Amino acid sequence: MHEASVRNRISLAGFRATDVTGELVTFNGLTDGREHVAYVVGDPGASPLVRIHSECLTGDVLGSTRCDCGPQLDEAVERMVLDGGVLLYMRQEGRGIGLYNKVDAYRLQDADVDTFRANEMLGRGADERDYRPAAQMLAALGIRRIRLLTNNPDKENQLRALGIDIVRVEPTEVHRTSANERYLVAKARHGHRLEVGRDLQPSAVRGDLR
Ligand SMILES: Nc1nc2c(ncn2[C@@H]2O[C@H](COP(=O)(O)OP(=O)(O)OP(=O)(O)O)[C@@H](O)[C@H]2O)c(=O)[nH]1
Ligand SMILES: [Zn+2]
């Protein structure tokens, strides 16, 4: 695999209105030329907790309840505060199809098409994400062994195939609400390890970080 290198590091305080401080790392030489970044919390140690989070402007920034991305982002960093970790924030909006296409896909979902089929109706793959840049970023940070925070077997399998030693897969919580239920059921049908048979949570808002 083509090597990437660290381009710059800066300290950033106040992760999503908390008192968490992390280090934002940029890179040179990422295969797809996109501006993916790492956010390093504390001292990641020998086999750090790693979250590979795909950009979701609607969920991460605007707080949309259509998906579970915002609560997953909070959960990941909250877990890293304990003994360090690395969040890779991948600029793979809409599972790689981009924001405008995702919004087109949302319109189809409003007419009852599921999230993966909606991508296909737009002539795109159900999930176009390629985790090579993530593997490059870990290598550039000198990280070979990780504990991966995910419920997505494809993410795990691609990383293993790229030579990342995943010593443990840690499941993310299922942040299930009435608003994102159909989305999560579609993910479970598509192979994500989710228990969607349980009772709904009253709200996706997590108060414990704030
Ligand atoms: N195309 C499309 N993308 C979506 C939709 N909802 C969320 N996304 C994108 O999906 C990505 C997150 O993927 P998920 O399938 O929720 O989770 P994951 O990263 O595969 O799996 P985990 O590691 O278990 O969280 C982000 O890039 C979101 O922008 C949707 O309805 N359509
Ligand atoms: Zn989302």
Image (cartoon, helix red, strand yellow):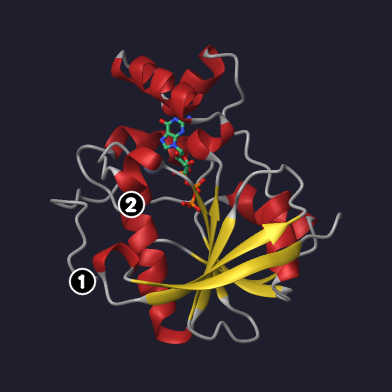
- At a point 64% along the width and 73% down the height, the residue shown is 146
Name the residue carrying label 2: 70
* Ligand 2: image quarter: top left
Q: State which quadrant residue 187 falls in.
A: top left
Measured as percent of width and height from the top left, residue 209 is found at 24, 71
- At a point 29% along the width and 36% down the height, the residue shown is 66
> Local crowd at mark 2 within 10 Å, few (<14), some, or many (≥20)?
many
Residue 196 makes an appearance in the image: no
* Quadrant of image for the C terminus: bottom left
Residue closest to the far left: 202
- At a point 27% along the width and 48% down the height, the residue shown is 176
Element at label 1:
loop
105 and 115: which is toward the camera: 105
* Quadrant of image for the N terminus: bottom right
Measured as percent of width and height from the top left, residue 127 is found at 58, 33
Q: Amino acid at mark 1?
A: Asp
Q: Is label 2's Cβ within 8 Å of ligand 2?
A: yes
Name the residue carrying label 1: 208
> Local crowd at mark 1 within 10 Å, few (<14), some, or many (≥20)?
few
168 and 92: which is toward the camera: 92
Element at label 2:
helix
- At a point 20% along the width and 50% down the height, the residue shown is 199
Q: State which quadrant residue 5 falls in.
A: bottom right
Measured as percent of width and height from the top left, residue 46 is found at 65, 86
Label number found at residue 167 = none
Name the side, left or right, on which 30 lies relative to 21.
right
